[in-house]
Image: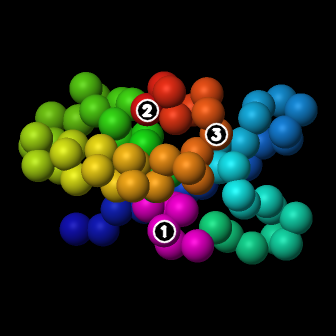
Amino acid sequence: PRVAISFVYSDVDYEAPYLTNFSMDDDKLPPFSLRLLLVCSQLLIYYQRFDNLTTQHLRACYEYCKQHADELNDAYRKKV
């Protein structure tokens, strides 16, 4: 099966960026490691919505987020 993932950007005056060390000024996508961090973070926040997530999946995402915590905005990191 194929899964599509989209990333949304907002104006910093509307919402603070989730990533601390990345800017869209270059019009480039974040590197894969940061995109994975965003996916894992969102998965942890909304895990109740997914029936087929195992403890192993959640643990892997949690460990990845912990490992890259310095890349996340403070407020968003606390939410995760």
Residue flagged by tag 2: what amino acid is it? Val
- What segment is highlighted magenta in the picture? 31-36
Q: Quadrant of residue 53?
A: top left
Label 1: which secondary element = helix
**Which residue carries the number 1 mark?**
33
Residue at x 10%, y 41% (from the top left corner): 55
Q: Residues within 10 Å of mark 1 (few under 14, many from 20)?
A: few
Q: Could you tell me if the residues under marks 1 and 3 are in contact, i.e. CB atoms within 8 Å? A: no
Using the numbered discs, state the Cα–Cα distance from disc 3 to disc 2 in whole angstroms: 11 Å
Label 2: which secondary element = loop
**Above or below, comparing residue 31 to residue 61 in the picture:** below
Residue at x 15%, y 35% (from the top left corner): 51
**Above or below, comparing residue 13 to residue 4 in the picture:** above
Earlier along the polypeptide chain: callout 1 or callout 3? 1
- Magenta span: chief secondary structure: helix
Left/right of residue 19 with respect to residue 78 in the rendered view: right
Residue at x 22%, y 68% (from the top left corner): 1
Residue flagged by tag 3: what amino acid is it? Asn
**Which residue carries the number 2 mark?**
80
